[in-house]
Image (cartoon, helix red, strand yellow):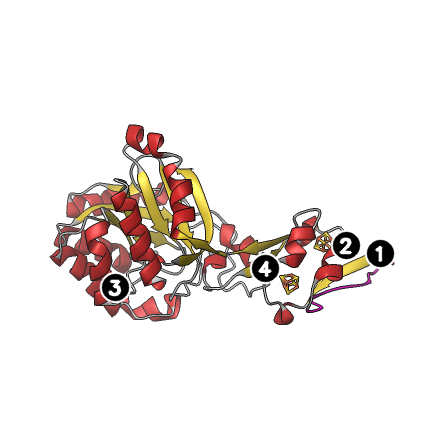
Amino acid sequence: MKVNIFNIQRFSVDDGPGIRTTVFFKGCPLRCKWCHNPESNRAVPELLYVKQKCISCGACAAVCPNAVHTLSQGAEGAPEHLLHREHCTACGACASVCPTKALELCGSMTTIDEIMQVVLSDRIFYETSGGGITLSGGEPLYQPEAALALCQAAKEAGLHVAMETCGFASRAVLLSVIPYVDLFLFDYKAEADTHEALTGVPQAPILTSLALLEEYGASVILRCPIIPSCNDTQTHFDQIAALAKQYTQIKEVHLEPYHPLGISKCEQLGREIEYDNREFADKKALERRAAEIHNRCQKPVKVN
Ligand code: SF4
Ligand code: SF4
């Protein structure tokens, strides 16, 4: 069993309790305009290119089988490196010879055993901190068989398992993983009226998934990215409070302030920037929102 992942982050402290290893799955059914990890969107390997690191040495052009890289005469006579991405098959040859790491292949097919080897190397830290493994992404349930296999392997090894999910998955897929997941970090992104325009999918299936987790007694932390001019509305905060009050299985609410780090990743992928806001969110304002939500649902609400 292989899984397409783009990162394994050890010593993570923001993806569930204690010290954790977070495995980032590549591929997601949503297209949130503000996506913090745009390199996770597509379920195939992709080439990242950091123009500022390129010294126009031409090593990539020499090895690429598809003539993706060309060097032309720049404004002052110096060679200028151009990328023709439409021909790239993500073979990785150019990234392996680039002397400045201006090129990087994002995403690789990795076996469950290989992932577990990395994860288990930090077992001592999980045991002393109450941590474990977190499946994140992208969307882990976009590769449902692999997500299930990794959850099962982690449980067999006696680890605490958390899964960050957007909830856009079928009933059968969710039911398959519930027995192996100790904690769902469940994203709640927007009001019903604007959900599809902001994320690319309707809200209803996501609320159905949340209700299913409640029905089966799965523990949930509701994670809410708060994006200026997109979902920082009174109605949205009202709905977060109402959900947290309604569902006993929602143990905490986390408000996730917007950060602009996804923008440079869009540039490295050669993608259009849909939400071009380069300011970090005002955390103080969100602290006030957190207090309001707490007063209404009587559950812990924190700003991450
Ligand atoms: S190998 Fe790297 S540094 Fe050299 S031209 Fe290609 S991208 Fe630029
Ligand atoms: S990943 Fe392969 S096909 Fe794509 S640009 Fe690099 S060498 Fe060419």
* Residue type marked 3: Val
Residue 56 image label: 2
Residue annotated with mark 4: 47
Q: Residue, x 78% and y 59% (percent of image)?
A: 80
Q: Secondary structure at mark 1?
A: loop
Q: Residue, x 56% and y 53% (percent of image)?
A: 264
CB within 8 Å, label 1 to label 3: no
Q: CA distance from mark 4 to mark 1?
A: 24 Å
Viewer-nearest residue: 143 or 117: 117
State which mark lies toward you, 1 or 3.
3
Please say if 142 is above or below 250.
below
State which mark lies toward you, 3 or 2.
3
Asked if one can make out residue 121 in the rendered structure from this viewpoint, the answer is: yes
Query: Which segment did they paint magenta?
Result: 66-78
Q: Is residue 211 magenta?
A: no
Q: CA distance from mark 1 to mark 2?
A: 9 Å
* Residue type marked 2: Ser
Residue annotated with mark 3: 173
Q: Position of residue 236 (x, y in %)?
A: 28, 58
Q: CA distance from mark 3 to mark 2?
A: 47 Å
